[in-house]
Image: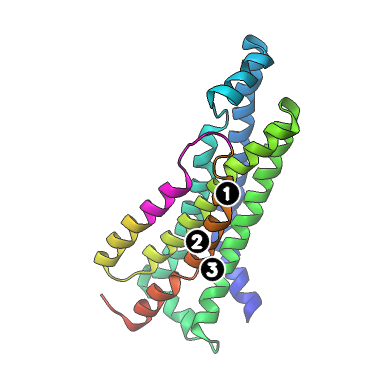
């Protein structure tokens, strides 16, 4: 039974997940083509100086890649379940409803995690070509909250899509937008380092918010 549920979820997101991962890698490759351009025409010393002393983030546009992935996967995974209330068919399986929903949620988040890990490997590998290990480490610390923002977007979009009331959807959208901005601010490189444990805990707590909307959905509240 569980394998059937997982397979169903995979069928919904597989093409979008693979497509997002490929486009994300292409986006990172383009980012480092620009880095290569700066090294060629400005010199590595000047480029490093701008990063170390001027606070320039050469990877600034990277923040939108994980965020778009979280939004995309949540929509393609949960929106089909709300059409004609198809999710209620899943809830009628001889399994506990919350367990089924958490399995779906965990599978989507797990697939997103694998995609993010691949993107991170590409980012680190290319960074190591152009920058010393200290700068690579600081860059990693800077982008980790952006990946967390992708998970937050995934959790909140799932919450919003499954919510039967438009009033609650608007409220969740405002709250979700506020939380996402916490993760994607652009301070100096590695400034988010001390906040990563707290942001990680906050992200984990948000992961179960879907259960509230699912309960209201099951009860048919509007």
Residue 146 x, y percent position in the rendering:
53, 46
Residue 126 x, y percent position in the rendering:
71, 32
Q: Is residue 183 magenta?
A: yes
On-image quarter of the C terminus:
bottom left
Q: Is residue 177 magenta?
A: yes
- Label 2: state its secondary structure: helix
* Of the two numbered discs 1 and 3 in the rendering, the one whose residue sits closer to the viewer: 1
Picture disc at residue 202:
2
Residue at x 71%, y 43% (from the top left corner): 121
In this figure, which residue is indicated by the disc labeled 3? 105
* Of the two numbered discs 2 and 3 in the rendering, the one whose residue sits closer to the viewer: 2
Residue 54 x, y percent position in the rendering:
54, 22
Decide: few, some or many residues near mark 1? Use Cα within 10 Å; few <14, some 14-19, many ≥20. few
When the figure is inspected, residue 142 is found, relative to residue 53, above or below; the finding is below
* Of the two numbered discs 1 and 2 in the rendering, the one whose residue sits closer to the viewer: 1
**Mark earlier in primary sequence (1, 2):** 1
Picture disc at residue 194:
1
């Amino acid at each position: 039974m569980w394998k059937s549920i997982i397979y169903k979820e995979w069928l919904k997101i597989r093409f979008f997940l693979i497509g997002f991962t490929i486009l994300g890698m292409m986006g990172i490759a383009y980012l480092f083509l620009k880095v290569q351009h700066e090294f060629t025409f400005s010199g590595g010393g000047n480029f490093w100086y701008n990063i170390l002393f001027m606070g320039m983030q050469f990877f600034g546009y990277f923040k939108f890649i994980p965020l778009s992935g979280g939004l995309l996967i949540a929509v393609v995974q949960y929106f089909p379940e709300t059409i004609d209330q198809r999710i209620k068919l899943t809830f009628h399986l001889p399994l506990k409803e919350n367990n089924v929903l958490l399995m779906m949620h965990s599978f989507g988040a797990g697939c997103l995690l694998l995609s993010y890990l691949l993107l991170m490997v590409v980012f680190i590998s290319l960074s190591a070509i152009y920058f010393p290990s200290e700068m690579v480490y600081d860059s990693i610390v800077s982008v980790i909250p952006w990946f967390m923002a992708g998970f937050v977007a995934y959790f909140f979009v799932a919450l919003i899509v499954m919510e039967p009331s438009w009033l609650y959807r608007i409220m969740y959208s405002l709250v979700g937008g506020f939380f996402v901005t916490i993760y994607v601010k652009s301070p100096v490189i590695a400034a988010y380092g001390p906040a990563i444990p707290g942001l990680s805990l906050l992200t984990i707590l948000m992961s179960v918010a879907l259960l509230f909307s699912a309960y209201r959905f099951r009860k048919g509240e509007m």
